[in-house]
Amino acid sequence: MTERPLVSLIIMAYKAEKFVREAIEGAFAQTYENLEIILSDDTSPDRTFEIMSEMAAAYTGPHKVILNRNPVNLGIGAHVNKLWHETVTGEWIVVSAGDDVSLPERVSELMDIATEDTALIHGRPLAIDDKSVQFEFEERFEKVNLPILERNDVEETILSYTCVRGATMAINRKFLRFWGGFIPGLVNEDVILAYRAQFWGKLVYTRKPLIKYRVHDESLSNRPQPKTFDAYKRHQSKMANEYLHIYKQVMIDNEKLKLSAATVAVLEERKKYHETIFFLYGSGGFKTEFLGSGLFYRQLVKRMLIKVYRAVKR
């Protein structure tokens, strides 16, 4: 019988002291045998790393446990680069955030699906709240994102900013080595991985839940609508900056992708738009738009201000 591949299960955490113990317990309970578990803290100011250290020291199970704490806060993109390209030794990487919980059979089930030409596996999670109580959620991903991914059109995936379900991923390291790391400052690695996986090999989705995905006020995916103008400015600037990083990564990857001229032209126009938004919200020039009521009014004022700004810049 062929030995199953070595898998690296990574728990990446930042300020996760409320939930990281449960996440680690899920990792330690994995039924898959050929497994290394990496517990990595991005210089949290709370007790995240202390809990990781205590649990690693007390662990007596069959899996190899590696403990890491970054000397300085790297942010998502750089933290991912370090772990995926420098730390792991497995042929496959299974990811987990410090507040999510892997079911015991997660790695084993994912490896049952994996093949040599599979780039990435992702799937449906179970949703839990901050008390670990499961609840039903609208399956928007399978209605909106999944049909796009299944059409396997790289340019459509890029132009629609369609992502994979990052919290649920298993990733083939051969696929990662083909593409290399991410640019500094990138936080939307699930968007980049979607088109990269389509280009390289098979992108597989499973509807069997293998992880409990936690939804709470502090999670990155749960962004409340800003209530004040200062918060609104920060939100808009941050979003524009994230889109600009996606654009930069796509343009670097285009050396391999060879996107059509029409797609590049659309991306260039979007880049100009997000550069404008990033500048204007940084200067506070959109207060009129923020104070307005109704989506149509906001979009109208925003378009007018952008036209004025670009005219002045010329």
Image (tube, rainbow, N blue to C red):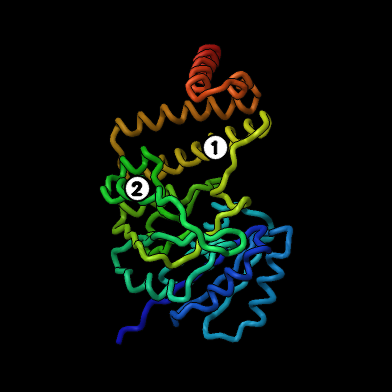
Classify mark 2: residues with Cα within 10 Å, few (<14), some (14-19) or many (20+).
Answer: few
Mark 2 falls on what kind of element? helix
Instruction: Locate residue 92 relative to residue 256 in the image: left or right.
Output: right
The image quadrant that residue 168 belongs to is bottom left
Q: Quadrant of the N terminus?
A: bottom left
Q: Position of residue 146 (x, y in %)?
A: 33, 50
- At 52% across and 81% down in the image, what residue appears? 63
Q: Distance of mark 1 from mark 2, alpha carbons?
A: 24 Å
Q: Which residue lies under the disc numbered 1?
A: 239
- At 47% across and 21% down in the image, what residue appears? 296
Position above or below: 54 against 254: below
Instruction: Locate residue 162 relative to residue 99 in the image: left or right.
Output: left
Q: Position of residue 126 (x, y in %)?
A: 46, 62
Classify mark 1: residues with Cα within 10 Å, few (<14), some (14-19) or many (20+).
Answer: some
What is the three-letter code of the residue carrying label 1? Answer: Met
Instruction: Locate residue 312 relative to residue 7 in the image: left or right.
Output: right
Label placed on residue 143: 2
What is the three-letter code of the residue carrying label 2? Answer: Lys
Q: Judge by depth and name the residue closer to the eye, 299 or 270.
A: 299
Instruction: Locate residue 125 relative to residue 130 in the image: left or right.
Output: left
Q: Position of residue 179 (x, y in %)?
A: 40, 54
- Labels 1, 2: front one: 2
Q: Judge by depth and name the residue closer to the eye, 255 or 45.
A: 45
The image quadrant that residue 19 belongs to is bottom right
Q: Judge by depth and name the residue closer to the eye, 166 or 226.
A: 226
Q: Judge by depth and name the residue closer to the eye, 94 or 83.
A: 94
Position above or below: 260 against 67: above
For marks 1 and 2 on the same chain, the one whose residue lies earlier in the sequence: 2
- At 43% across and 79% down in the image, what residue appears? 32
